[in-house]
Amino acid sequence: MISVLHALCSKRVAAWCAMAALVSASPLAQAQVWPGKPIRLIVPMPAAGTTDNMGRLAGQKLAEILGQPVIVENRAGANGNIGSDFVSKAPPDGYTLLISGVGSQGINASLYRNMPYDIVEGLTHIAMIAKGPNALVVNPSFPANNLRELLALAKTQPGRLNYASTGSGASNHLSMEMLKTAAGVFITHIPYRGGAPAMLDLMSGQVPMMFINFDSAVPHVKSGKMRALAVTSLTRRAALPDVPTVAEQGFPGFEAESWTGISGPPNMPADIVAKINAAMQKVVQMPDVKERFAGLGLDAAPGTPEQMKAFVKNEVEKWGKAVRASGAQVD
């Protein structure tokens, strides 16, 4: 009789163990122990640019904090739309994330007639990484020492001066369009396919001027390969302290900043969003990250998920005005 009872108890224990194993393997249990496997971090821009650099920095530091590999994957195209759309349709389990930015999560809403995803509601906006201005740079031989002299020259030669951009609708293109509107000048736009060829032509003298991301400008300005006439933030940057803002050169309130952040698919679990946001709060306080940001003229600004969503909504509205004023449009 006793042996029979032992056998029954053993069977019940085995059954309970099997049930426990099934429960622990359920999606809910997996979400509770996130991250339990490597994370994909999609960069929707080409390698070696500002967005890619921020993505690889974030990926490295998040891996250290979260204890899982973060695999950075470039899915470039359509000014960030291809990679962003991919993430917007991924499972909301926290294992596919996006490096979001001013183009794909701000400008594109007005630039593209048919967006494949909703910028504000079609993603979960988790944390900002950094913000930074654009810089107005010129070839070293260009005959203007400041913004006022450049604009005065443009007024005497309407349409004859050219400026480069990394592409129609990019933040550096629209920064110049905002300046042209404010100053009442006509400078001809020469769009390039990316920042590298545009900067090469500027440094070789093929095109005289352009706005570029401040962090991209810093090493070339310091090496003397280009000169910086203005920055688009409201305050000067410590990395190039002698370069005045556009605002202080006759255009009060002028501001046009680029930014990067981390977003994910819509409807992500709140606890996973909170973990990623908390990790980014730690990342931007790391001494080596703070030093790197300072050297590039970037401001760390992680904030809360709610603050980032509100920021993205405002970016869509702000850049929409610049897009409409410039007439830029992509089908």
Image (tube, grey):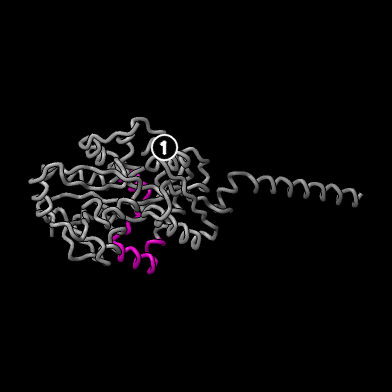
The residue at the point 35 percent across, 45 percent down is 193
Q: Is residue 67 above or below residue 191?
A: below
The residue at the point 23 percent across, 65 percent down is 240
Circle 1 SS class: loop
* Left or right side of 16 for 315: left
For residue 314: magenta? Answer: no
* Left or right side of 217 for 59: right
Residue 45 screen position, x and y as percent: 41, 48
Q: Nearer the viewer, residue 305 or 58?
A: 58
Q: Quadrant of the C terminus?
A: top left
Q: Nearer the viewer, residue 39 or 237?
A: 237
Q: Quadrant of residue 287?
A: bottom left
For the image, the number of numbered tags is 1
Residue 108 screen position, x and y as percent: 33, 38
Q: Provide the major secondary structure of the magenta segment.
A: helix
Q: Quadrant of residue 177?
A: top left
Q: Is residue 227 above or below residue 120?
A: below
Q: Residues within 10 Å of mark 1 (few under 14, many from 20)?
A: some
Can you see residue 319? yes
Q: Nearer the viewer, residue 214 or 293?
A: 214
The residue at the point 65 percent across, 47 percent down is 25
Residue 295 screen position, x and y as percent: 31, 66
Identify which amino acid the numbered label 1 is placed on. Answer: Gly
For residue 290: magenta? Answer: yes
Per the image, the residue denoted by label 1 is 122
The residue at the point 71 percent across, 45 percent down is 19
* Left or right side of 213 for 48: right
* Magenta extent: 282-311
Can you see residue 310? no
